[in-house]
Amino acid sequence: YSTNSNQSFVTGNFTTQIQQSPFLSTHQGSFTRTAPNSANSPSTPRTPSTTSPFHATLLNSPNFQPRSAAKLVQLAQACETLQTKTIPLEMSRLQSERNQSYEDACQGFLLLLKAEQSRVDSASHRISLRQQQKQEELGRLQREQEEYERKLQKEREEEARMEREKKEQIQKQKEEDRIKEEERQSALHAAEEEAEKEDALKNAHVERAQILMSSLEKVRNEELKQFDSSKSVSRRRLQFKKVVNGKINTLSHEDKKVIEVAGVVVEAVKGAERDDAAQGGEDAVLGMGKKYLLDLLASNLIVRVQADGFNGPRGDGFPLAAMFSSVSTECEELGPVLEAHLYTVCPTAIPILSLPTSKGDENALMESLGMIKDKNGEFESFDKFLHRTEGLISIMADIMSSFPSNHTLLGGREGALTWLERFLDLIPSPPTSPLPLLTAPVLVAFLTGAGHMLANNYSSKFQTIFDTIKNDIIERLDESPVGVPSATRLKKVVGAGLDKMKSELPQGAVESLYNGKESCGSVVSSFPKMSGFGSVGASAFGSSPQVTAPSPFGRGSASPFGGGSTSNSMMGDGAGVSSSSAGSGTPFGGGSNSSNPFSS
């Protein structure tokens, strides 16, 4: 507060107190005043002053109550004194005390401010430290955030790099897989082509046999039928039949007799060729004599070996076989004709277990096996069928095993090994059982005719074949009432052992004409050369057919008597056989150089 305001305050209060005289008279003992003390704070209470005359008067008159004008004047004077002297002094004192109190307060405030400033400074320092720590923390967090972001960015870049590498690796793997797949497909395609070629090569004999059979049927129906019915060649037909039905009937197991009959047949063939050349220009029928004679020879052979009294495994066919093999060296055209006749009546001789047929009935199946019908249209019994098959397979094996060793009729001795390997290849592999009914009779007929020759000429390869028959096929034969006789005979042949088969000449074989041990064949070297004979060159029958069509008889052809897949081929080490009519003609026309049906 200012001095003037304090003074006015005091004066006003005091004037009020004077005017209230009853109050003074009533409360004079309690009238007090307060004033600041330099030694005390402004709020410290002070005792009343006794230095004022007015106070003294009041104090001296406890019951002070002015009752007269003099008293009033005295009171007024006292008041004036109080107003002019006492109050200013009091006010001065009060002002001094107030100033001192103000200074003390300011000093206190200053101390307080200094204390607060210290606390403020301390707080500011702490705040500054906290801010600094916060800044450092923020800097650290920012650095950590930046480090984290850099790490995260690095991880993202690493992930992106790994993803790119993964994609590149996947793409590379896909490309490698594609290349490998292309290579695999290419290899598979090449393997398939190779397999097809190999299969076609393995089955070329089947295709060739089919072509020969169809060609034979065509020639017989379109050409030879005219020669057989033409009166202009009746005399020639009679001469041919005398040779075929007459001279061949004189065959015996004497080697000289076989050579004699072979010479007569070769002379007849050569004479027919000369007559065809001389008379063929006038009439086409007149030029068919050689075709007719060769067809008659082959068909006569087939009829003979199918007769009820013919017993191939007993050796009845060796003289006939030796005669035909001898003739074939002078007339190579005989080979395809004989093959066509043989395959027509006996598909097993191809070899194949059955010819495929589009029909599914029993009659078609029997026809595919080579079963024939009698005059009443009934199929022959299985016993007769198996007997015929044995005879046909037997004569084939006898021809293959006959001298001269260089003949190629039905493939010759090399064709025998190849044929046996092919036949075993047709037999279903284990555990298929029982095997086809034809297995036992075919093997009996073939081994009794050609087993000795194979054991002596191809000992290591035939040993493998013999072991397969002995250890596998024998155990799975069909031993039904129809199959047991053949199965028993095969067990007897194989049970005698390979050594016996190798050392003993087959029953009924003409030793000097059989291509077995080296001591055999002593007569062959002195075969008489027929006058006017040479190797037969160009033929009126045209060239041999080329086999180009895919084989309809794959190795997987179903057997009529047994299921399962065929066994693996045993022909890997089979010897190839030169063509039986290479460079020569065939009676069925077609391309040049026929393929040997027994070549690998």
Image (cartoon, rainbow, N blue to C red):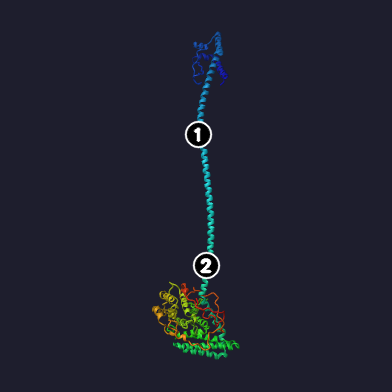
Is 533 rendered above or below residue 61?
A: below
Q: Name the one closer to the observer, 243 or 308.
A: 243
Looking at the image, which is closer to me, 94 or 349? 349
Spot occupied by residue 484 in the image (x, y as percentages of width and height): 41, 79
Residue beneath disc 2: 188
Horizontal side of residue 384 vs 540, given as left or right:
left
Expressed as whole percent of the image width and height from the top left, the position of residue 52 reads 52, 12
Residue at x 52% of width, y 69% of height: 192
Q: Residue at x 53, y 18 (%)?
A: 96
Q: Residue furthest right?
A: 282
Q: Is residue 307 visible?
A: no
Q: Nearer the viewer, residue 29 or 88?
A: 88
Extreme residue toward the top, this view: 70
In primary-sequence order, the first of circles 1 and 2 is: 1
**Where in the figure is residue 345, as x and y percent of width and height?**
50, 81
Q: Quadrant of the N terminus?
A: top right
Mark 1: which amino acid?
A: Arg
Residue at image x 55%, y 8%?
70
Q: What amino acid is found at the position of numbered circle 2 in the picture? A: Leu
Q: What is the residue that sits farthest to the front in this orientation?
A: 525
Q: Which residue is mark 1?
A: 126
CA distance separating discs 1 and 2: 86 Å
Q: Is residue 4 above or below residue 346?
A: above
Q: Is residue 278 visible?
A: yes
Q: Residues within 10 Å of mark 2 (few under 14, many from 20)?
A: some
